[in-house]
Image (spheres, grey):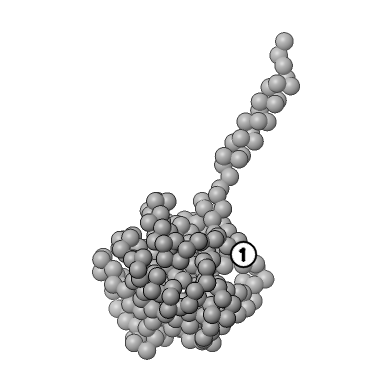
Amino acid sequence: MFNWTTKIFMIVTLLVVTAVSAQATKISAYYTAPYASVKTVKSKLEKAGFKVLASYAPAGHNSQKVLIVTNKKLMTLASKKSRGFAAIQRVMVDTKAKTVMVTNPSYWLAAFMQKKYKASDATAVQKALRSALGKLTATKDLLDDDELSGYHFMIGMPYYNDMIELKTGAKVKEKKKIFELKLANGATLIGVNIGKATEKFVDKIGADKALLLPYTILIEGGKGYALHPKYYIALSYPLLSMGQFMGISSIPNEIEERLNKSLK
């Protein structure tokens, strides 16, 4: 006799197993690391093979210093067309809060390398960060790992490839330049000071994530490109609510305006 109970049990079990296996892995945008002074963190990063390109006080927060770093692996990955934003990672030392925040290479490389990303790309970078900074603890700023290559905040919002195209033949004014990194493919990634007043948007949505600053411009093929602020800010704040997003609704256009004004 056909056992319907057994059949139903098997079907339910198969559906549960399939659903579980299909679940995406949550990945954090950031790590925290044991606190140390800016000088100590910088020294340890350099000993671990990183080049510290700049130290920046975001939004005029003198108690926060964002260290922009690169290494050979990041430079190699970034020397592909339209992938220059992958050349750097960021470490923020907050001397007031006594915290160290670090970008998670797995998260940011997956977002910036798009279809060209392999999980192994981040392994060496993560290992070097651990060597420099000690135990890295993932924050609760999570997205599904399978969302990152096609991330956008919501329907109608920009993706990675929907970059702002700036002036042709763009060059960044020296007084606005935070760092300049030349890549093997002839492109250049430049950190730009977009002004304290514009950068203050981080105070409204979370100054602990101020390491998304300074904003960067990629000069490639004689043109300047920047990640669309509606993409980059949302990617930097995975827990951003619609209310918070609407609270800084004027900022994307202001950032674009400031980026263009930083060029000559």
**Residue 49 seen in render:** yes
Residue 105 x %, y % = 44, 60
**Residue 82 seen in render:** no
Given the current orientation, which residue lies at the most extreme top position?
Answer: 1
Residue 102 x %, y % = 49, 67
Q: Residue at x 45, y 70 (%)?
A: 90
Q: Residue at x 33, y 60 (%)?
A: 73
Q: Helix or strand or loop: what does disc 1 sit on?
A: loop
Q: From the viewer's perspective, is 89 left or right of 34?
A: left
Residue at numbered disc 1: 239
Given the current orientation, which residue lies at the most extreme bottom position?
Answer: 175
User: Image quarter for residue 220?
Assistant: bottom left
Residue 223 x %, y % = 32, 74
Residue in front for this viewpoint, 42 or 246: 42
Residue type marked 1: Leu
Q: Residues within 10 Å of mark 1 (few under 14, many from 20)?
A: some
Position of residue 204 relative to residue 114, above or below, is below
